[in-house]
Image (tube, grey):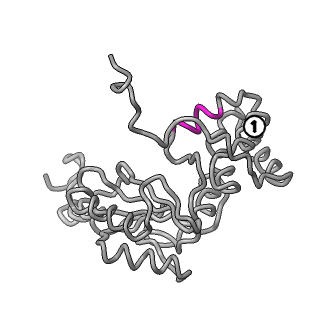
Amino acid sequence: MSGHELESHFANTGKIDMTDQSSNIDKAAIEALTALAERYPIKRSALMPMLHYVQAIDGRVSPKGVEVIASILGITTAQVSGVATFYTMYKRRPAGKHHIGVCVTSLCAVMGGDILLKTVENKLGISPDETTEDGMFSLEAVECNAACDFAPVMMVNWEFMDNMTPEKAEKLLDDLASGLQVRSTRGPVVTSWADTEMVLAGINDGKADEGPSAGDPSLAGVQLAASKRWTADSSQGGEK
């Protein structure tokens, strides 16, 4: 087997960038990370939330973040890095203030996801897994956002933007760049990727109840069943 056959087509995966040793992790951040670990009966269970917290502080999984987490949890830096480099939500290089995800899996692609991604690439002047020079936007081609009933779907800082078109995408990016208020289709007002990372770390932002949790397309089946009095068990008196 030739070396060419073993060539990776995932250039942005792999080890954490050790050439960038910068970090904003200070004493307060270390105390917060320690508090996260103490929430769990087995401290190692806090590893993934702690990685999100590091990203909120440093914009990525930084070398110092890896070292601090390993020290708090009593595990090796290799064990921390192994998790950080396995999941695509953990970034090797700094993400933007707003992280844009465009779904390109089957249904979204059929409904225009590929065109949507190309529109965003051209608008921002970057490719997936890159960040704009001003640090405002980063871009990711996402494999399924679990929102096929709203395809094609974009996400901003992991908040849903449903039934997107190229025109809607361009306006959305313009509004974000201008600092205008943008609300998720089924969620809260968009803040920043760092703020979302704090939520993923387990820090409550008080916005869990902002916006509907499900839209009409998602509820169509259960609404139809209710109108027809269908039940899972016909012996309960509902129609068959």
Q: Residue at x 60, y 54 (%)?
A: 94
How far from the left and from the top, in percent, is residue 76? Answer: 71, 27
Q: Is 8 situated left or right of 204 in this image?
A: left
Q: Nearer the viewer, residue 208 or 164?
A: 164
Quadrant in which residue 152 is drawn: bottom left
Q: Is 220 situated left or right of 78 in this image?
A: left
Q: Residue at x 42, y 76 (%)?
A: 172
Q: How many marks?
A: 1
Quadrant in which residue 222 is drawn: bottom left
Q: Residue at x 23, y 60 (%)?
A: 221
Q: Which residue is mark 1?
A: 67
The residue positioned farthest toward the top in the image shown: 1
How far from the left and from the top, in percent, is residue 185? Answer: 41, 72
Q: With respect to residue 236, does 67 lie above or below?
A: above
How far from the left and from the top, in percent, is residue 175? Answer: 47, 80
Q: Is 34 situated left or right of 5 in this image?
A: right
How far from the left and from the top, in percent, is residue 239? Answer: 15, 56
Q: Amino acid at mark 1?
A: Glu
Q: Residue at x 72, y 44 (%)?
A: 65
Q: Nearer the viewer, residue 96 or 26?
A: 96
Q: With respect to residue 97, does 16 lie above or below?
A: above
Work out which quarter of the rendered image holds the N terminus and state it: top left
Callout 1: SS: helix
Q: Please give the range of residues in magenta.
A: 80-86
Q: With respect to residue 165, does 131 lie above or below?
A: above
The residue positioned farthest toward the left in the image shown: 240
Judge the density around disc 1: few (<14), some (14-19), many (≥20) Cα neighbours within 10 Å: some
Residue 95 in magenta stretch = no
The kind of secondary structure the magenta stretch mainly shows is helix
